[in-house]
Image (cartoon, helix red, strand yellow):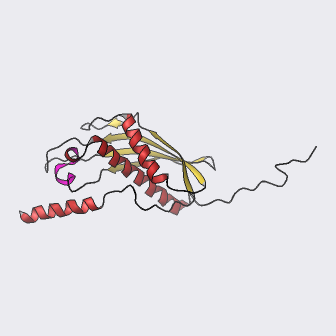
Amino acid sequence: MIRTFALAGGLALMAACTQTQIDEAPEELGDFKLRINHVVSDKAVKGPVSRDATAEEWKAGLTNAIDARLGRYEGTQEYDIGVYLGAYMLAPPGVPVIYNPKSIAIADVYVYDVGQKKLLAREHRIQVLEDTTGESALVGSGHSRTKEEQIAGLSLKVADAIEEWLAEEHQKDGWFDARADTEAEPGAENPPDS
């Protein structure tokens, strides 16, 4: 019995040590700079056992998390990020150890290249589960976290997933590679007299 509790405690502690943090090291995003962070949450579907949350609460949580993660890049090429929250479930209090529902958020992400005037991605699906802490591992986050804490945690996980995905696309397809400035053709600014 003691071994069982020790193992459960160890697993919970390991999970707590790997929580997503707001100030994690930046990814390699080339010449990326966030211009617009547009979050839409008014059509999100609430899961059947979820706590209630308003569209405004979700919009504020996602906007703040995405600004914190993507607003720190200081490239010279601007990009717009659109995030559409499709569904969520905020875990209510469950029965400790027996039934511990986890919170989840599902969102679609759009990326627009302002300089090239084109969409780089449309409806890229992101699905995240909340982090497990030492406290929530046994009693569930419905007991250990408020609704606001659950929204903030899931929003940060969404922002983290977006940041990591953008870094993958940058490495794979060169999305945010620096582009040479387009030079005007000679005489374009001052056309000759006719």
Horizontal and vertical percent for residue 154?
Answer: 34, 48
Which quadrant: the C terminus? top right
Q: Is residue 38 above or below residue 158?
A: above
Judge by depth and name the residue closer to the eye, 19 or 84: 19
Please tell me which residue is depicted at 62% across the width and 46% down the height of the picture. Answer: 117
> Residue at the left extreme?
1
Count how many numbered circles sit on residues in the image: 0
Please tell me which residue is depicted at 49% across the width and 51% down the height of the picture. Answer: 71
Q: Is 140 in the magenta?
A: yes
Span colored in magenta:
135-142
Q: Is 179 in the magenta?
A: no
Specify whether 180 is left or right of 18: right
Specify whether 167 is left or right of 76: left
Which quadrant: the N terminus? bottom left
Please tell me which residue is depicted at 22% across the width and 41% down the height of the picture. Answer: 92
Judge by depth and name the residue closer to the eye, 107 or 53: 53
